[in-house]
Amino acid sequence: PNNGIDDDHNGFIDDVNGLNLYTQNGNVQDDLGHGTLISGIIAESSKGHVKILPIKIFDAQGKSSQFLVACALQYARQMGATVANCSFGYDYSTEVLHSEVSDAQANGLVLVASAGNQGLEKTVYPAAFPDVIAVASLDAHDHLANFSNYGSFLSVASIGVTAKGSGTSISAGYVSGLMGLMF
């Protein structure tokens, strides 16, 4: 790591512990805590039977692009991932993201995505793409959480109000861990 050389000849420099596509290096340090939280939920819900490949695509303010998301899905496929957690969403979709989601799915990558936290009947991408496992949040009484988006694009709902925090990202983390455990 950190020698500036693509030692494994996979086209990426210093990606020993994952890849930071935002800064194009191997530093996957979490600036926000969101990725670390979701990774922990995935590990917990899979009973520790998954291997997590960190791919950083967001800056310290939580901003990214659908192009970087598409690149991350492509990298995940290249590295042999079977499940991709997408605990984020966009109000719109681009052709580059739609194309890569379709390619990823055609090559066996299962995508799990959060439905969004606006409490509206609203489509959010990548969750709203066909065949993506779109996850809404349930509260402690197994009712749709008041913040969870809803709509016909949803696949499943999972607990999303926990001591760790609340949101559809958390729900998608639990489902991602379960999918990993199933594989």
Image: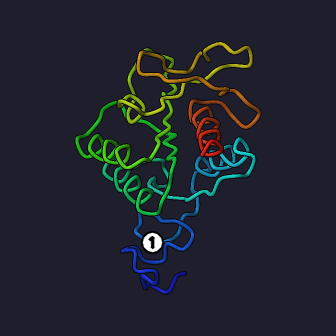
Percent position (x, y) of residue 29? 58, 63
Q: Is residue 72 above or below residue 94?
A: below
Q: Residue furthest left?
A: 95
Q: Is residue 92 above or below residue 78?
A: above
User: Looking at the image, which is closer to me, 174 or 88?
Assistant: 174
Percent position (x, y) of residue 49? 70, 52
**Residue at image coords 34%, 45%:** 106
Report which quarter residue 129 is drawn in.
top left
Residue behind mark 1 = 25
Left or right: 19, with 164 as reference point:
left
Percent position (x, y) of residue 172? 57, 35
Amino acid found under the numbered disc labelled 1: Asn
Q: Is residue 81 above or below residue 11?
A: above
Report which quarter residue 53 is drawn in.
bottom right
Q: Total number of numbered labels?
A: 1
**Residue at image coords 64%, 52%:** 36
Badge 1 crowding class, 10 Å Cα cut-off, few under 14, some 14 to 19, many 20 or more, is: some
Callout 1: SS: loop
User: Looking at the image, which is closer to me, 77 or 124?
Assistant: 77
Report which quarter residue 167 is drawn in.
top right
